[in-house]
Image (cartoon, grey):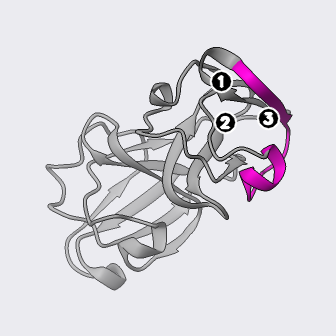
Amino acid sequence: MVKIFFYEGRNFQGRSYECNSDSSDLSPYFNHCNSIRVENGNWILYEYPNYRGHQYFLRKGEYPDFQQWMGYNDSIKSCRLTPQHQGSFRLRVCEKEDFRGQMMEFTEDCPHVYEQFHHNAINSCHVHDGYWMFYEEPNYRGRQYFLRPGEYKRYSDWGASSPRIGSFRRVQTMY
């Protein structure tokens, strides 16, 4: 059974809430979130209700304060269990919008986009297989964006405010 625990205080203190499925609004259960324990599953957490705002990808483990999950603040207001995926991963990134400019395909994680792709920006992409997390900075740091299979004609389609992507990795199912 998948399960995640949210705590108002750091180090798993204070009021808590146990969740085992997607929730579009966690507001009734806690005011702020300073620590999290993921017992099972991979989760995408969102800063605001209805799966909006900053996104955070968490795997099984303990996160004693919001900086441990690269949080910008102590606001978590919705969450989703990542879909299960069995099979291959394939992602095509493009330098310009609408799949124009230099293009490159990936089937593995990329800790430093510039070293592989030789561009500082990804303006469009096509997720052929699997689920992926984009990170604004190299080495899986900074703002995060969860991408499902499909076409993203411009960076705003995946929720970014700029085309700067420093790294990305596959979201592998771990239950």
Residue 131 falls left or right of residue 72: right
Residue 87 spot, x, y in % from top left:
84, 33
N-terminal of the two: label 1 or label 2?
2
Q: Amino acid at mark 2?
A: Tyr
- Element class at badge 1: loop
105 in the magenta segment: yes
Depth check, front residue: 81 or 146: 146
Residue at 24% across, 78% down: 9
Is label 3 in contact with label 1 (beta carbons under 8 Å)?
no
Q: Nearer the viewer, residue 80 or 5?
A: 80
Residue 61 rendering spot, x and y as whole percentages: 56, 70
Which mark sits nearer the N-terminus, 3 or 1?
3
Image coords of residue 3 (percent x, y): 47, 55
> Circle 2 sits on which residue?
131
Residue denoted by label 3: 86
Q: Earlier in the sequence, mark 2 or mark 3?
A: 3
Callout 1 touching callout 2 (CB < 8 Å): yes
Q: Which residue bears the numbered disc 1? A: 149
Q: Is residue 67 above or below residue 50?
A: below
Is residue 150 found left or right of 146 in the rendered image? Answer: right
Residue type of the residue flagged with mark 3: Gln
Q: Is residue 121 left or right of residue 18?
A: right
Magenta span:
100-117
17 to 109, vertically: above or below = below
Secondary structure at numbered mark 3: loop
Left or right of 89? Residue 137 is left
Residue 153 in the magenta stretch? The answer is: no
Q: Can I make out residue 94 in this image?
A: yes
Q: Kindly report which numbered mark, 3 or 1, lies closer to the viewer in this rendering.
A: 1
The residue at the point 71 percent across, 49 percent down is 169
**Residue at 64%, 25% in the rendered image:** 96
